Each structure stands twice: as structure tokens, then as C-alpha cells.
Amino acid sequence: MHSKKINDYVLDAFIYVVLIAMGVSTLVPFITVLSKSVSEEWAITSGKVNLLPIGFQLDTLKYVVTNNQFLHALLISVLVALIGTLASLIVTAMTAYPLSKRELPGVGVIIVLFVFTMMFNGGIIPSYLLIRQLDLIDNLASLILPGLISVFNMLVIKSYFESLPQSLEESAKIDGARNYTILFRIILPLSGPVLATIGLFYAVYYWNDYFNPMLYINSTSLKPLQLYLQDIVMNADSSSFKMSAEDMMNVPAEGVRAATVIASTIPILLVYPFLQKYFIKGVLIGSVKG
Amino acid sequence: MKQMTKKLSLAATTVILASSLAACSSNNNGNGNDTAASNAPAASNNTSTETNANLPTLKRLDVFQGEDYAAYPVAKLLEEKTGYKMQYDMLPQDNPAQKLNLLMASGEPYDIVTSYIDMALYSDYAKKGALIDLTPLIDQFGPNIKNAISQQSMDALKVDGKLYGIPNIITYPVGFGILIRTDWLDKVGMKMPTTTAEFEAVLQAFKDKDPGAAGAQNVPFTIKGDLPMIDDLVGAFGMPNPWNDVDGKLVPRVLDPAFPDYVNYVSGLYAKGLIDKEFVVNKDATAKEKFSSGKAGAIAVHWADIPGIADALAKAAPDAKFTYVPALKGPNGKSGFGANQGFDRVSFIPKSAKNPEDAVKWINATLEPTTFKELAVGVEGTHYTVDNGSYTPILPIFNDERNLANNYMVGTDEANYPQYWQARVRKNPIMFEAFDTLNNKTADSDKILNKLSVAPYLENYSKNNMKLETMAGDYTVKLIAGSEKLDGLGDFQKKFNAEGGEASAKEVNDWYATAK
Amino acid sequence: MNRNSRWKLARSNWDMYLLLVPGLIFLLLFKYTPMYGVVIAFQDFNIFSGIGGSEWVGLEQFQKLVHSDDFSRVLTNTLLISMYKIVILFPIPIVVALFLNEVRKMFFKRTIQTIIYLPHFLSWVIISGLFVTLLSPTDGLVNQIIKVFGGDPVSFLQDNSFFRSVVVFTAGWKEIGWNAIVFIAAIAGIDQEQYEAASIDGAGRIRKMISITLPGIMPTIVLMFILRIGSLLEAGTEQILTMYNPIVYDTGDVIGTFVYRMGLGQQDYSFSTAVGLFNSVVGFILVISGNMLSKKFLKRSIW
């Protein structure tokens, strides 16, 4: 009994040391960017800003955050991420549930059809033509519909559904419940952790999506944050080619770019801590069974 | 059950929200009437709208800029001067050609499209019939356009004898040079170098005497990793431009007989520790960091990058002074900077435009000399002052209202624009001094024209150029850093020719023979 | 008889198929409708001529890729880097998830979880810039530590014997926290009663970790692994583009970076589609085989 306790301590110590080391090292880049966003420009240009800000100032951040285009793009991004995540979660769960019943005829083929699209796609041009034909160019729906179901996410949910005990559904079926009732009333309430995870994945996907808006959005007033961010950050990285002297003179300062990165990343970073309460284990399964 | 109804109603709300979003934004495309303008966050001017009620709203696609086109003061000026309302869209900063292609191919109804010059794209559009022939329209509605744009410029953009685009000219010949710390020169007791040998001696002194007291971090001369052809030094070996005249023929640098000499010189500098040991991993920012923190004595850099560097250096090393090294003479007495002419942007009118005539009228109105001047530099006394013919901006209003003016131009008043344009460089006196050294104080004989910058569209050259430049650049980096030896040059040249070098050279020289 | 009973099963679960309708419409409309675009890979496609008007060139685009001098080097690098990434980096997020599961202090657990997923949100441009600084032979932190221990400074990013290791390490470091999330969620889904029963039997924490938690998340592990090998030919183009330089092309140049650098994919829709198709075919074969093998030996599969 005694030795077991010591073992526990050693295990704990080991785990804590490893996790803290990881935590510290992964915090570094974020702190660097954060420091740049609140440092004076000369210190950034001369490479003096590492972990701590030099010449602390909040003007850059304030300038970025109060910029009208930034705020507008932020609003668009929040809207798209919210609606997109909800719509995606619902449709994905609805699709995953039948596909988790392998005994149903046709399910195997449909899964392969889904998996096939993870590897193969028709490319930019046919996708663009499709969106154009659906009259969705310059329409926020073009940012949601093409990514409505991520096959990866659908498979994760499906795999989770498969791991749920069969007995739950069987007893409900005996009571005469239909499948959709079982899905919405029994399965989904038990799926807190996986729905939180996939919700996070979708939210991050919609938030970080740069490609769809780049292709499908033309007017400035509908541009989401990533497009805005990419334009600002890309600006400085292409300095050697194609830029005229005017463009070079107008490149946003590195501090501004850092501040834009910070301001556009923090909102999505807040989603995870908020969702973590749904990661509390198996409480629900126990309660339903009991 | 309660939970489920809640979820369902949430889903319903979502659907409704999504569809209403769809409804309100689908108008924005301007497929029908141009109702979009009222949705765009334009600084609308009621009075001018009323007076110009008959004129259509034009739609323009332009290059990326950091601020909203419609809200920038120049937009309002142009609306007043031309009488037209304009709805602006912009291309993304990253890979703009991809989006431009999609928009052009799908026939989006833009009245004017402006993009960075890409002769391959432009001539593809022209040949595929996607552009409107401008000559008749300019004859009819464009007297100012004819006056502003030189015949030479027009000719350069002709595809199969027809004009489809209006160019914006490049306003200065020389961009890159070697910036050197003059206070370091004083500290080591040496004069500004005038030859490659003296330059090497100076770098050696920078290394030995460490005037910046940077210790192990002392870097005599830093460059960024993707620019192994160092301006000024390439000129000293007779290769100031990517293609140079060798016995009457244009030859790319890696095939130039002087190439081994250049490589020997620069790789010698590297081997002796005079060029940044880490230059291959240097990004643009890393190289600038080393110079602006006072650890490097020299840097190869564009004059437009100077303001940021100067600000940082003033704080990091308050006594620092710097200037561009003049054109260095090489072992064979050659010297010079590569000098560009030609265009940086081109504007055209797609076949799918709804209002091509009005577009030309609009362009004509903006090129009216006084309007163009106000567009370029603003109002005298408000935005700029003139002294002895040189234009000086009034800050900060010039920055706020004219910094991005060049993005609004379709063509330029070619005779006067280079003069107006220098107001932009005078925004920062240190930058202007550097610009002046490279462009105005360099002898004309040392500004060696890049012949290809005024060439018409050359198909093979355009198609292969980027690949060949990358191959040559990568190979030169390896030679300088010593991971390849010059014995392999013959093999590399064979590969270079096989990958399109030979085809390009033939095409380039067929044209060059006729152009001389 | 058998067919009959399957039909019966399908009919009695008609509402299951109804649930599938939105997903299938999505699949057909947004995934399969544009699929005709793959034929571009066999054409010399011009965007104005369209698929109907462009010239057919057969396998020319593939030959352009395979026949170039550097292809064997580039393919080898791709496979090596990708395999290192799978072998070394695939298990780490699982271990991290297991470790986090052992942490009882909720605040600590959540804080670490949140922190280690931060780098996922920063672009490679930023991360690479940071590592260039950290790994600099003159003033980088890593080399300063090496010097303190009496070693000679190493030019990690200019040395062909180190470059792949740097690529694998930084990729892991950036994505571990993010990749652990799905395993953390899977652990949260494990039935608690199993642990209670094991405790009564006197099982220690490590025993429980190995005999309950690990099997509990095995379906997720298998799923993730099969999907992971499907992207074997994508060794991290964006990452390597921001980290490499001509000196380390010998070890670091992969298919994606090669295609990008040569400008081959620039507006050359046919060639980039061909490269994509090549990746897809290899990926799909790997996923199918992975699924088959896993079905045979682990009795688990995606379908």
C-alpha cells in the first residue's frame, strides 16, 4: 500500500513536469507576438523584442481594434462562425447517426462515398462555377454551405456513436421510439464531449477559413476577418516581388501586423476554455443508466 | 422533451437567419442593376448624385490596399471630377492572379480592371477575346488619354497590333543598392569604397575592428537569403540586369561569361566571414534586424525600406549614419546599377463590361492634367508645396489623403508624373536622400537599362522566367555558400537551357535584334 | 432469405435514411458535382476555353512531374518526412491526452489544455521566424545552451543532417495540443463504471490507463491513424516553404514545395490538378488498405 502511494507521487511528478514543460514552450510564440503588438516599432525592427515588450504602448492595438474595417470583418466572422457551427453540428450529427449503424443496407457504400471526397476534389474552377450557378457569389452562405459537413468530423462523431452502449437504444425502441427521437433525446444528450469537440473544430474551421471567402467574396463589406488578416500579414512577406515602391512604403508596420494577429486570434481562443466544461467525463452516461 | 424543442427552435432560427442573410447579400453582386452601390460603405455625396443621375455607376476591380477604396478621400475627389460614381472591389494580396482569372473567365461585369503587370496573363486575356479593343474608344472619347500616355507605352501593350490596356509607368530607375554605415567607415579610418577590392578591404576592416562592438554577432555585410545577385556588385562584373548584352546578344546571368568571376568574388567574401554567415536563412526581416540593431555594417536593401530601418537604427545606435555605396568598379572596370523602365500596372476593360464607353470617359476625365495632378499630389498649399520644380508633401495630410492615390490611377500623365511622384519619397528626408543618391546622383552611364523591361510580350520568356530565375538564384546561393562548386556550372547550364533557358534566349534575341 | 431480411431492416428504419437526406444532398451538390474538374489533369486547360474547349494531352502533366530530374529526390524527402511525422508525432498527442487525464487539479488541467493548443492558431510564417531566431548559430537560445555544455554551435537550418529533425520537431510542437483534443474528448466519453470496478479490484493508475483508458479510445486512435496515412504525400508544404533554403533542398524539398517553387502550379491549372490527383490516388489507396488491414487484424474499421 505504501509503495503504491510513492508510485503515485512519482507518476504525478513526472506528468506535471512534462505538461508544464510543454505548456511553457508552447506559450513562447504567442507571448512573442503579444509583446510585439504592444512594443514600439523601432524595437521590433531591430529584433530586440522577444519575450518582454520594449517601450510598452497600447496605441497599436487600439489602432487595430478601433479600425472600422477590422470591426466589420470581426462581426462577419462571428456571424459566419456561429451560424456555420450550429448548422454544421446539426447536419453532421444527423448524417453520422445512421452511418453508425453498419448493419443497415447501403451504409458501407455511403461511408466510402464520403471518405472518397476527403481525398478527391474537383478543384477550384468547378467549385467556383457551382457557387456562381447557385448565385451565391458575394453571399455569406457561400462561406458556410461548401464546408457544411467535414467528413473527418462526421467520422469522429460516428465513431463516438458506435462506442455508446447498444442497450440504451434497444430499450427505447422497445418503448416504440422512432430513430430520430432516439438521436435527439437519448444519443445527443450523451454526446457532450464529442459535440463540444466537433463544435470547436467547426468554429475554428469557419473562423480560420481563408480560401472560401477569398474565392467567393468580392465586396469589401462582406469580407471576414481571415481575409482581412491575410491581406495585412501577406503584405509584408511578398516584399521582393511585384511590389512597387509605393506598396513597400505603405506596408503595415510589423507591430500592426502582430496586433492584428492578436486581435483576430483571441476571440476564437476563448471558445475552447468555454467548451471545456463539456469535457467532464461520462457523467451523463452514468445518470441515464442509473 | 423541453431540451429538444429548444434545440429544434434554435435550428429553425439558424435556417431563417442563414436564408435572410442570403437574401440581403445576394443583391450585392450587381448582376442586375447596380443597386450594390447603395449597400457599399461609400462616402456618398448627395449633391453629386443628384446632378449626375443619368450616369451609370461604374464597377472597378483594383489591386489590394489596406484601406477601403470607397472611403479614401481620393474616391470622393474622382467622383466630383468625373461625375461618375464608382464601386470598387479589390483583389486579394495573396495570389491575386488566381482570383483575377476566375473573375475574368466567369465574365464578371467590371468596367475597369487594374492589376499588377503580368504580360502573360494580359496577353492571354487579349488573345482569348476577353478584352475590349481600346483604340476606337480612345479615338472617340479619350483626348486626354492620348496626350498623357506616350506612343512608346501604347506600343508596348499592343497584342497582335491592337491596344487592350493602359499602363502605369514605373517612376524611378534604380531600387536596390548597398547601404553602408559611414560612421563605421570613419571609425575604421577608411574612405567610401569605389572598387570591389576596396569594398572587400572595408568589410575586412569591419570584421577585424568590430566598430559596432557587437562581438561574435558582428556582421560586416548582410543580405537576405533569396537575393544572391547583389545589386551594385553584379554591376561591377558587368551583369547589372537579369539579362545583359554580351557581344550584341542578351544573355541571362548564369550563362554570362562573367558569372564565375562574380561567384568567386562573392563566395570569397562569404568564406572570409565578410558576408553574413547565416544569410541563407535570412528572411527580409532578419537581414533588416541585423542592420537596424547596429550589428551589421552594410546591407543590400531597397530605398523604400529605409524609413523603418532608419527609425530603428536611430534608437539602437544613435550615432549611426549611412548612405548607399556608389556604383563600384569591378576588376575589369565595369560598374552600374540595373535600371528599370516600363510599367508596374496595367488597366483594361473586359468584354463583359456594361459601360465600356463610360469607363473610357472616366479614364479620360482622370487624366485631364489638372485633375491628374490633384489626384497624384493634391492641392498646392494644402497637400504639397513646390520649390524649384520639386514637390514636397505637407504632412500628415498628404499621408492621410494621398498615400494610396496611385491605386486609383488608370494610366499616368507620363511627362509629369515622375516629378509629382517624388513628393512621396520626400515624405521621409532620410529616404529621399538615399533615393536621390541612387537615382539622381548616380551618373547616367551607371544606370544601365534593363532591356527586357521595355520588351513586348515574349511568350516563352514569360512562361519560363520565374522558374529559371528561381533555379538560377538557388544555384547561386549554393555556390556562394560553398555547397556547390563552380566545376558543376557546365552541367547546371545544360539543365538551365533544357528547362527553357534556350527557348527563352532565342525568343529574347529575335526580338532584341529587331529592337536595336 | 438474407436479402429479404436486409430489406426488412431497411424498411423498418426508413427514418434513418430520412436523416441522411441533408447530408447526401450536400455530398452530391458540393462534393460530387464539381468532381468533373479532375479531367483538367488530362488536358492543357485554359480557363477561357473551358473544359469543353481545352486540348486533351493524356498523361503529359503527370509525366512533367515524374520525369523531372528532381522528382526522385523530392518523392523520397516527402515520404521520409511524412513517415517520421507519423511514426514520431502520431502517438504523442495520445500520451498527452492520457497524461492530462491523470491530472486531478481541474484548473491546472484546463490551463495546460488551453495553452498547448495556442501554437495551432499562429501561422507558419510566425512560428518559423521564431525558430530561425531560436536556432541561430550566433545568438540563438538553443546554441547558447549547447555552448554552455561545451558543444559547438550547430547551424540547424543550414545543415542537411539536422533539417528533417527540425521540421518534424517543430511540426509536432505546433500541433500536439490541437491533435490531443480529439483524444481528450474520447477519454471523456469512457464509461466511468469501468474505473470504479477496476478500483475495487485494486488496479493502480497505470494499470487503469493501459487496460481501460487506452482500449476505450482505441476506436478513435484507429480512425485517426487511418485518416492520417491518407495524407502521406502532404509532408507539410506550408511549413517547409517558410523554413527551408537552397542548402537543405537535398533533405527538405518535398513535392509541394518543389511544385510551388518552380512556379509550375502558378495558374497552370492542369499541372496542379495532376499533382493533386496523384496525391489523392495514393492517399485513397492507403486509406482503403489501412481500413482493410485494421478490419482484419484489429477488428475495427471505418466502414
Image (spheres, coloured by chain):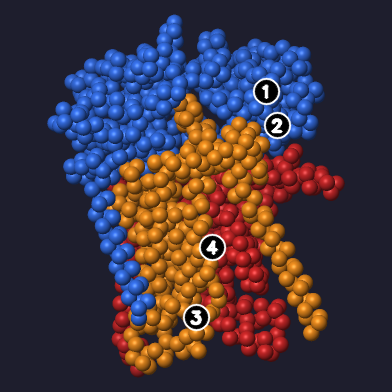
Residue C5 horizontal side relative to residue B472, left or right: left
> Mark 3: which secondary structure?
helix
The colour one sees for chain B in the rendered image is: blue
Q: Circles 2 and 1: CB distance less than 8 Å? A: no
In this view, the residue farthest toward the top is B388
Question: For mark 4, does the 10 Å Cα neighbourhood hold few (<14), some (14 to 19), or many (20 or more) residues?
Answer: some
Q: Circles 3 and 4: CB distance less than 8 Å? A: no
The colour one sees for chain C in the rendered image is: red
Amino acid type, mark 3: Leu
Marks 4 and 2 belong to one chain: no
Amino acid type, mark 4: Pro
Whole-percent x, y for residue B79 in the image: 26, 28
- Name the residue: 37% across, 69% down: A90
User: Mark 3, chain letter?
Assistant: A
- Name the residue: 40% across, 52% down: A77
- Name the residue: 72% across, 82% down: C204
Marks 3 and 4 belong to one chain: yes
Question: Which is closer to the viewer, label 2 or label 1?
Answer: 1
In this view, the residue farthest toward the left is B54
Residue holding disc 1:
B318
Marks 3 and 1 belong to one chain: no
Residue holding disc 3:
A284
Question: For mark 2, does the 10 Å Cα neighbourhood hold few (<14), some (14 to 19), or many (20 or more) residues?
Answer: many
Q: CA distance from mark 3 to mark 1?
A: 66 Å
Q: CA distance from mark 4 to mark 1?
A: 46 Å
Q: CA distance from mark 2 to mark 1?
A: 23 Å
Q: Quadrant of residue B346?
A: top left
Which chain is assigned orange? A
Q: CA distance from mark 4 to mark 2?
A: 45 Å
